[in-house]
Amino acid sequence: MTADYQPSLLSDADLRAADLSSAYAAPPRSRLTEAELQAWKQRVASYQQQQRQAEEPDQGVLFAVKASPAKTLDPFSLAPKNAEFWRESSRDSGVPALYFVVDHQVPLLLYIGETGKSNQRWQGVHDCKRYILQYVEAHRGYHLAVAVNIGFWPHAASQRKVRQALEAELIRRWRSPFNKENWTLWSTPFVGDKP
């Protein structure tokens, strides 16, 4: 052995068994061609822009009932934050909120979620992080512009079931492709292949 030889701590068999070998491999390219990626985004964005421009018909009511925020909330108008926002130092524990992952380059609403603590939800494991990574990776492979950010609506109810009901209503309205309820609708190519 030469003096500069450094043995691996793990054998090839160890790497395969632990599935760590993928950490050293080049990331997989998107299964979509550039044209397919652009067409997929355009289909989703066209639907969402129709929703954004559609006006809810006024219907007279016998008793005054406050309209659901799902009819008026515009996820594209929320102040965008970098997806790593939670790394910023914050003294508060956050507030109940709905959050929206948007590619502002298109614009395209990718995901809708709810949380009881807005400054902590995105920490740790979240499947949507993987979907976003694969989405951004697909764009980078074709040198396409992408601007994925997250926006918070801090006026959500403190009761979890109420927040979840509003979240479900918004998912139905906007048909956000990274929410599992809409995977078959859009044939979402970014939600498979767990690492």
Image (tube, helix red, strand yellow):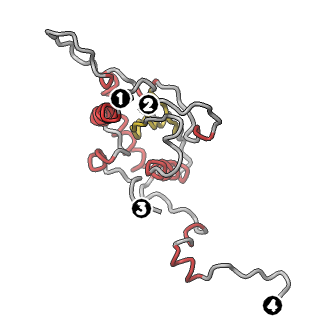
Q: Residue furthest right?
A: 3
Picture quadrant of residue 87? top right
> Residue at left 27%, top 36%?
172
Mark pair 2, 3: CA separation: 31 Å
What residue is drawn where x is 57% and y is 77%? 15
Q: Which residue is mark 3?
A: 193
Kindly check if marks 3 and 1 are in contact, taking CB atoms under 8 A apart as contact.
no
- Residue 136 placement (x, y as % from top left): 51, 48
Label 1 sits on what residue type? Gln
Q: Of callouts 4 and 1, which one flags the residue occurring earlier in the amino acid sequence?
A: 4
Query: Gap in Å between the C-alphas at discs 4 and 1?
Result: 65 Å
- Which label sits in the foreground, 4 or 1? 4
For label 3, the crowd category at 10 Å Cα-Cα, with few meaning under 14, some 14 to 19 and many 20 or more, is few
- The amino acid marked with disc number 2 is Pro
For label 1, the residue is: 49
| Callout 3 amino acid | Asp
Q: Residue furthest left?
A: 62
Q: Secondary structure at mark 1?
A: helix
Question: Which of 17/176 is in front?
Answer: 17
Q: CA–CA distance between discs 4 and 3?
A: 41 Å
